Amino acid sequence: MAETVGDFVLGRLRDWGVEHVFAYPGDGINGLVAAFGEADNQPRFIQSRHEEMSAFQAVGYAKFSGRVGVCMATSGPGAIHLLNGLYDAKLDHVPVVAIVGQTARSAMGGSYQQEVDLQALFKDVASDYLVEVNVAEQLPNALDRAIRTAQARRAPTALIIPNDLQEEEYSAPQHAFKHVPSSPPGPVDSLVTPPDREVARAAEVLNSGSKVAMLIGQGARGAVEEVMRVADITGAGVAKALLGKDVLPDDLPYVTGAIGLLGTRPSYELMRDCDTLLIVGSSFPYSQFLPEFGTARAVQVDLDPSLIGMRYPTEVNLVGDAHAALAALIPRLERKTDRSWREAVERNVTSWWETVEKQAMLDARPVNPMRIVWELSQRIPDNAIVTADSGSAANWYARDLKMRGRMRGSLSGTLASMGPGVPYAIGAKFACPDRPVVALVGDGAMQMNGLAELITLAKYYELWADPRCVICVLHNNDLNQVTWELRAMGGAPKFEESQTIPDISYADIARGFGLEAVTVDSPDDLGAAWERCLQADRPALLDVHCDPEVPPIPPHATWDQIKATTQSVLKGDPAAWHLIVQGAKTKLQELTPGGP
């Protein structure tokens, strides 16, 4: 039987080492779907419940495997559904390749069913590389460039293949002068090192400072040893952008944790009080959480020169790989003999974790959401992967989850989309089938799309060497983050018609899909519930009824700001007095020394 274009595409994906394609079928990709059958499902077709979930699964897979994620969808509506996940990849700098079908070539321009201008649709999200394949001879070059570009630029790319072409016999390019040849699949890694003169200038800045702070992001992931060495020599405290939360463990005494609205007080104080700042692999956008203008000299290390100096007026910019740049910098650094700054940072960190525990142990109605994550931190395996959805779940992930060992974690860091928590977890399980995964998800995101993806978990978990995948639902019947934003930034009380969501049993639904499920409505039951889920022989759902009125107070919040929020809720918020009491109790823990 002759090899079709669909057959060739799958064969080339195998040549690139692609093992999974996250997809949903449709007649716009019938030729490709048929090819999966002919190829004994190699690479494996991972069927989601919705194309957006396929894209998120590919993003999660790429984040936790370090390899390119591949997603696939039919023409028209299927391709449109991929967009949100692909924008998540674009904004978080994740390599993903989207392969989409299209109307038959002879029907294009004829207002045919499901005909959409896909090149216009993907022009922005796949701006690094987008191509429509209209003759077989464009392959393998078009597919190879899509993969190489995604790898090299850490970005989504897209390949459009009309459905009639997929079923045609494959015809290879004839000769190099008429058609561009393509090299065999292979790595595209490179090591970029900044020039010595700039490294020397950076060392001068860092050596001159007496209160050095470091801010690291996901770009520092390949330079963990170097980051720790620089921190040791300079006596720096290290704050982490949210996408870099898993770069350094939180049990290091000088790691101040997350920075920003979802960050910690030690990170806020580190930036407020430092006189020198070293930014490594981060484009953290909220400059109000960086040192005041004119109070600190700054150095930035980033692989992407377009991101240098965007967030803070950096004096020296080292364009290069974090590992190479810091390795070149370390021999030029002078060890700080006065360790009083480092000691103050470490005292602040120790005090903060005591505060976090006190806040988590406060009574609530019925369960304090901070305690959910605090109890997880005491029990989670050192090799676990944690995903978090957008919303209040991200607050508690950022502040209360203590990274240690080989733990990994991520969320939709820049797009901040609702809905990736569960599909990220599925992508993580395919990337690392021998590691346990935990997803922290709000009930709003579960109702949006997470419930459907429990079916995907049930469908595939037997393929994984370690089947553990715990979906923890923060069940408060409220679109909680937006509710708090209305109160704190909009000056308005909660509007129940928009914010209150239906009360359902997530545990009952999970049981119906054949998963382990536990419901918790008392804080005393949390520890045992986590242990049960983390020891289950299949994916588990932990349905925790928690208090929506526990406030995610930012680390810089003053009593005046809290007073302003209080005044907004007193305008008619249905839970005003309970909210005020919970907020006062929570903030008070930062101000009182000693135990709870």
Image: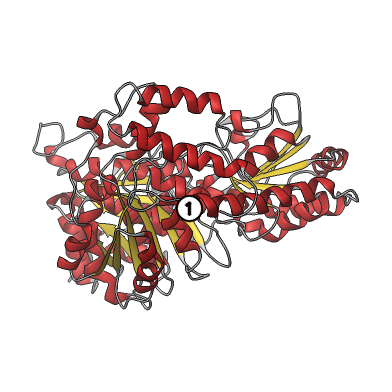
Front-lying residue, 186 or 465: 465
Residue 514 lies, in percent from the top left, at 19, 71
Q: Quadrant of the N terminus?
A: bottom left
Question: Is 253 placed left or right of 464 in the picture?
Answer: right
Looking at the image, is 131 positioned above or below residue 563?
below
Q: Is residue 1 left or right of residue 417?
A: left
Whole-percent x, y for residue 367 in the image: 36, 53
For the residue marked with disc 1, what is the amino acid? Ala
How is the protein colored in the picture?
A: secondary structure
Location of residue 317 with respect to 433 vertically, above or below: above
Count of all numbered marks drawn on residues in the image? 1
Q: Quadrant of residue 521?
A: bottom left
Q: Nearer the viewer, residue 360 or 423?
A: 360
Q: Is residue 428 visible?
A: no
Label 1: which residue? 360
Q: Residue visible at 54% across and 58% down?
A: 402
Say which quarter of the image contains residue 194.
Answer: top right
x, y percent for residue 151: 49, 52
Q: Is residue 162 visible?
A: yes
Q: Is residue 260 above or below residue 546?
A: above
Q: Is residue 280 left or right of residue 52?
A: right
Position of residue 412 measured from the top left corner of the image (x, y, whole percent): 42, 45
Q: Considering the numbered disc 1 on the image, is that residue within a helix, a strand or a loop?
A: helix
Q: Specify few, some or many for label 1: CA neighbours under 10 Å numbering under 14, 14-19, or 20 or more.
A: many
